[in-house]
Image (cartoon, grey):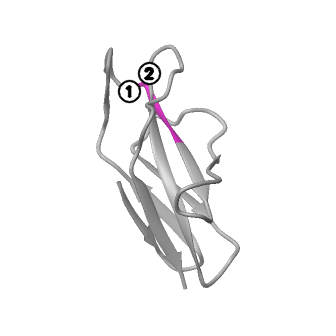
Amino acid sequence: MRGMEDGDNWVKLNWDPQSYSTGMAVGYNVYESLVPGAGFKKVTDEPITNTYWSEQVGLHGITYYYRVKAVGPNGEETLVSEIRPVEVP
C-alpha cells in the first residue's frame, strides 16, 4: 500500500490487487486511525472494488494511519494488513 498527501488535505492511497484464500478479493475496506496501532475505524461504507481510495481530511499537522483489508466473496476480511502512515502538513 502506498499513501500520500496531495495538497488541499487530500489523502490518497493505492495498493496492488490482493488474493484471498478462495481467489482474488472482491473488494477492499479502508480503515483510519490517529494512533499507529489501535483505534482503527472503517471509513468505507461498503467494500470498494478499486485498488485506490482518497478522502479529504480536516486536521493539519498530524499523521493519519490507514489499513486496507481485502474482502472475500462472502464478506469476510483478511485478518492482518499493512499500516501506512500519511502525514498532513
Q: Magenta residues?
A: 25-29
Q: Which residue is mark 1?
A: 25
Separation (CA) of disc 2 from disc 1: 5 Å
Residue at 51% from the left image edge and 14% from the top image edge: 74
Q: Secondary structure at mark 2?
A: loop
**Image height of 59 relative to 13, above or below:** below
The crowding category of the residue bearing disc 1, from other C-alpha atoms within 10 Å (few below 14, some 14 to 19, many at least 20), is: many
Q: Which residue is mark 2?
A: 72
Question: Disc 2 or 1, which lies upstream in sequence?
Answer: 1
Q: Position of residue 72 (x, y in %)?
A: 44, 21
Residue at 52% from the left image edge and 80% from the top image edge: 7
Q: Secondary structure at mark 1?
A: loop
Q: Quadrant of residue 89?
A: bottom right
Q: Position of residue 19 (x, y in %)?
A: 29, 28
Q: Quadrant of residue 9?
A: bottom right
Q: Nearer the viewer, residue 15 or 35?
A: 35
Q: Quadrant of residue 22?
A: top left
**Image height of 59 relative to 34, above or below:** below
Judged by its main secondary structure, the magenta piece is strand
Amino acid type at mark 2: Gly
Amino acid type at mark 1: Ala
Which residue is outermost to the right?
58
**Image height of 81 relative to 38, above or below:** above
In this rendering, position of residue 83 left or right of residue 42: left
Q: Are marks 2 and 1 in contact (CB under 8 Å)?
A: yes
Residue at 48% from the left image edge and 50% from the top image edge: 67
Q: Is residue 74 magenta?
A: no
Of the 4 image quadrants, the one containing the N terminus is bottom left
